Image: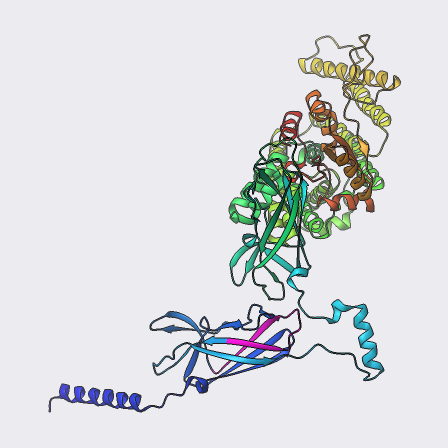
Amino acid sequence: MPWHRLILLCLLAVFLRTAAALDSQDFLPPEQAFKLTATAASGDKVELHWQIVEGYHLYRDKTKFQSQTGAIQLGQAVMPDGLVEHDPSLGEVSVYRNALDVELPLINPSRETQLQLLVKYQGCADAGVCYPPQKVLLDVVLPSAPTATNSGALSQFVKGLKGFTPSLFAEELLPPEQAFQFTASLKDPHTVQATWQIAEGYYLYKDKLSLNLQGATQTQLTPLQLPEGAAYHDAEFGQVQIYRSQISIDVPLLRGSSAAETIKLLAKFQGCADRGVCYPPMQAEVSLDLPSADALAPAKPAAVAELSEQDKIVNALRHDSLALTLLSFFGFGLLLAFTPCVFPMIPILSGIIVGHGDQIGTRKAFFLSLSYVFASALMYTVFGVLAALFGSNLQATFQEPWVIAVFSGLFVLLSLSMFGFYHLELPKSLQSALHHSSDKHRDGSYLGAGIMGALSSLIVGPCVAAPLAAALIYIGQTGDVVLGGSALFVMGLGMGAPLLLLGASAGKLLPKAGAWLNATKAVFGVAMLAVAVWMLSRILPAAVTMFLWSLLLVIPAIFLGAIDQLPEGASGWRKLWKGLGIIMLVFGVLQLIGLSAGNSNPLQPLQGMGLNVQAQPAAGLSFEPVASVAELEQRIQQASASGKPVMLDFYADWCISCKEMEAYTFTDSKVKQQLSNFVVLQADVTANNEADKALLKRFALFGPPGIIFFGADGQERAGQRVIGYQDAATFLRTLQQL
């Protein structure tokens, strides 16, 4: 017989044998292949168990549960993931083999003791036979609530303890009306306010919320505009937005008649407990008596809640790519580099570079600047992350008077070194430990620059701007230290980028030796003294600060030859320095004159001293101080009763942007006119005490400057929050949006 016929006969025999075996095989009934049992673990949980015979499997997505007892609702079943297998007809599916255990939470507020549970499931035999969907109705006996007994002193003690601490021992879920308390009221004849109070450990789905009027003929609701919820990954619905604690929304009414009317507001919503139990969709109905409206006007559609600048940045952090986020924050840092909070770092870094004299080169100047900037950005990041996690501005801690005095004294010592009174260097033993092979003490210099950069970020520039506030809010809300901290670090590098350019150019432009070098060091010595005076202005009276500024102008002016006669044939440079000296001398003398007349503004020393009575200083806003949350709430309520909006300004003596706002923004006539009907309050948080921290925490602020607006209804206008400095024109646009 040819070999290929032999192979064909063998294959045919194998096929026939397999077919015969398949036909003759005894498949188990489904109730034996998948043995199901159910037990009540407690009054609010049922445990189901399938014993699956070898060679059979259950489909995960075909396993469903329904309560046939009206008073008991089912929570979300807790099921294992299963094994991923390829099904010829269904593709990739999740299946169970050998055994399956499911926990089924119950919502049983009336403490029923009998549950009828309908279980649906479907499975197959590996041999290729699939069973039709199975439906099994189970009667499950639930344990009754424990009753009081006289079983001994210990049980009586536990019973009494439960009476004092029910939350500790009671594991039952709250009834839906307690977990999600819905209320509605009228704010005015044209506005309904709907509020959900959400218990701790529970949340509502944003997309499941709706409001409707039942049976109203003359009145309609405007389209519902819900605020942003918190991003949340739900096992059932995927990425969703949820609300916790409380949600309150104002819904304008469209009234077709001015007559009084009773309306019924129907709210629909759905929520879950964090422990994994989801409630079925819920409804709540509230009757509201609309008063007559004397002058009906169409209600304005509810405006979409406008996000403040920092909230927009927070959303960008949540949704933008990592590369775009870091690039954006580097740009924010570049913009912040040109604000007064960063300006004092320029003479500090310049003084460090100049202090190295003719030893400095472009490479070393750049790496000194890099050490300064890197340490500053790193400290900025570390303290920013800590502030976000702990909810306070830790930089404000370094604004204590003794800290500022010590740091100012350090700059005075550095300036005296620039003038040649002494030479600063590390002890020889420490130098050799830091850098074994460098005869120029390079490593120690880099370490010193880094330390100065770290201290500068903490003490020199503690102001809060919108990007900084956004990063801190993001870290505080999400706990994502990696992304938030990276954004802060990159922003710190952006703030320091101009300093790197300054450092590299200083190494190129500074003279190498001779009288020019000594003169340059003297200039930066004066700059160091200016930084010291600027810092002391936070804690010293304004008159004392003005006196120090005048000394800082008059004394260097004398060294520049302001009162010396020019020699014959003096160079152009000599004449230039004398001219600058005369200007400094005159302005310093004017400051002394203004000081003696009672003025304290060093930039306008003769303010109000002119013969023209109209030349009066531009007055700022007259703020009412508030020192606590309780005092603030009281003033807001009083203003609301009077029908006036409120502006709350957070201020501190050590906040440069705050002083800019007071000097340039709040003195603008148009700004004052726009605020004429406002109650203007100010919270001075200079002391950074517990009351100050509570006020900042009340509005989730990390430090000044910050301006909060409240409408005449006493509600905050969150979209118009101002974080950081705004000039008069920008601030006026903000006011016009209220």
**Quadrant of the image occupied by residue 399:** top right
The percent coordinates of residue 144 (x first, y second) are: 68, 78
Q: Nearer the viewer, residue 380 or 710?
A: 710
The percent coordinates of residue 441 (x first, y second) are: 70, 44
461 vs 635, left or right, is: left
**Numbered range of the magenta stretch:** 98-118
- Name the residue rendered at 63%, 66% in the picture: 275
523 vs 278, left or right, is: right
Residue 439 appears in view:
no
Is 105 covered by the magenta stretch?
Answer: yes
The percent coordinates of residue 736 (x first, y second) are: 63, 28
Residue closest to the far left: 1
Is 369 covered by the magenta stretch?
Answer: no
The percent coordinates of residue 686 (x first, y second) are: 81, 38
Determine the main secondary structure of the stretch shown in magenta. Answer: strand
Image height of 301 relative to 57, above or below: above
Display coloring: rainbow
